[in-house]
Image (cartoon, rainbow, N blue to C red):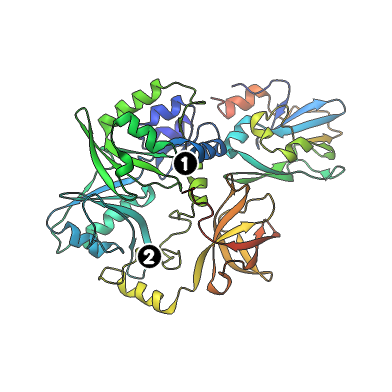
Amino acid sequence: MTDTAASLLKTPFYDFHVKQGARIVDFAGWAMPLMYRGIIAEHQHTRQAASIFDVSHMGRVKFSGKDAMRFLQHIITRNLQKAVVGQSLYSLVCNPAGGVLDDIIVSRFDDHWLMVCNASNRTKLLAWFEQHRTGFDVIIEDQTFETAMIALQGPQVIAKLEQALGEPLSQIKRYHCKQLRYLFFNFTVFRSGYTGEDGVEIICGNKLAQMAMGFLAKSGKDPRGQTLQPAGLGARDTLRIEAGMPLYGHELSESINPIAAGLGWAVADDKDFISAAALAEVRRSGPAEKLVGLHIEGPRTPRADAAVLAAGQPVGRITSSCPSPTLNRTIAMAFVPAAHAAVGAALAVDLRGAPVAATVTPLPFYKRPA
Amino acid sequence: MASPADRFYTDTHEWLKLDGDALLCGITRFAVEELTDVTYVDLPAIGKVVAAGKAYGEIESVKATSELYSPVDGTVAAINDKVKADPSLVNQDPYEAGWLVRIKTDRKDFSSFMTAAQYDAKHAAA
């Protein structure tokens, strides 16, 4: 393990993870915590209380200059025309064929925009931006290594954090953000996340992250019994599957278009951008395949790329699956032909040679209580 | 944490322990940590003939599915029903309560397997 970690990038929270007994894995070249105490325990704690996730591996790219907005309008699928300062928008970056290069969140600030992208796609996107910036007066700065990012997720997060920061965070709307100050340090709180729970994501400079880490470390080696507990990438994955959220490399790729993935709402039809023509065509003719949710009978879990069967014949493929700790049953997402995508459709999954019954079910699998 | 010294280990992260006229078999702490939370264990029927190095079952976790390999030639004499009912026993106690199968074998020489010290040296039980 130590040997693996040596060659990997480390977030400012790496020592904290190790101290907490995390199992460290290579995630897109970063030494990240897969789990601390157990994926299911961390998942359930997030649904019931509050968890802290280190997501500093995600890319953070700043766009400024006279044409920053015009450049982003060219690059991303969402129309930013009506975006106000303090608003965050989920969007896709697509190639001219409509294939997804990445899914991102872009936020508007007074004098710049900030994009958060997947760790695995950061260098690819930076190259893509370089390739397409001709004719735009835009400054593109990769801030990934000078900043840190954590996600605080769970029903108790907002109240606890309001107490700790003395800020009325509940006034920040979903997919909005606010810049705050602690001592000499600025940080930004985003009311967003990747778990299906209420909560925030915080971006701050590495200095403040180091201080936060010291504070967290002092909160004790054994976090059991505490409200805020660390959770790793394992729980982050099962939480996002229950919430029906796509993960790049599973539900999204360069050969998948956002309409098929159920993300048509994030593709503008009232502006021009790199993939506009291709995506308009997909929208006109309807996607050949659709992303669906599946309930799978029995205790077993199919893995990504397992075949989905209709009348015994392979027609689709599993993209993600897990035993759902909240629903206590196996759930999956899959691409199937549009003809088999209706809710209630009876399909099967090839589970290592044995067909197991599966039923198309609405996404998301889990919605937090209002 | 050192692996228990009262048994032998394989390269595929199984342990085997002499238990009367048979062997108790399970998977190591290292394997359990690689798997993460175990959610399903597929164990063979009692009486099934197993072969050294061949799969006799499967184990699934939140993250992965992997095969379970028999360390020896033999016959399945018992399976751990408690693990079938509560797979998380494998996470909690892989060396005792989380045993998987009891295999009857004619094998008497276990010198080709690793000792706990050898296994830990190879898989850095850090």
Q: Quadrant of residue A138?
A: bottom left
Question: Three-letter amino acid code at disc 2?
Answer: Trp
In the rendered image, which residue does mark 1 sit on?
A: A233
Instruction: Name the chain under label 1.
Output: A
Question: Three-letter amino acid code at disc 1?
Answer: Leu
A301 over B98 or under it: above or below: below
Would you say A14 lies left or right of A176 here?
Answer: right
**Label 2's element?**
helix
A289 over A235 or under it: above or below: below
**Which mark identifies residue A265?**
2
Would you say B72 lies left or right of A176 here?
Answer: right
Cα separation between marks 1 and 2: 27 Å
Badge nearest the viewer, 1 or 2: 2
Q: Is residue A128 visible?
A: yes
**Label 1's element?**
helix
- Pick the front one: B28 or A239: A239
The x, y position of residue A225, in whole percent, is 51, 25
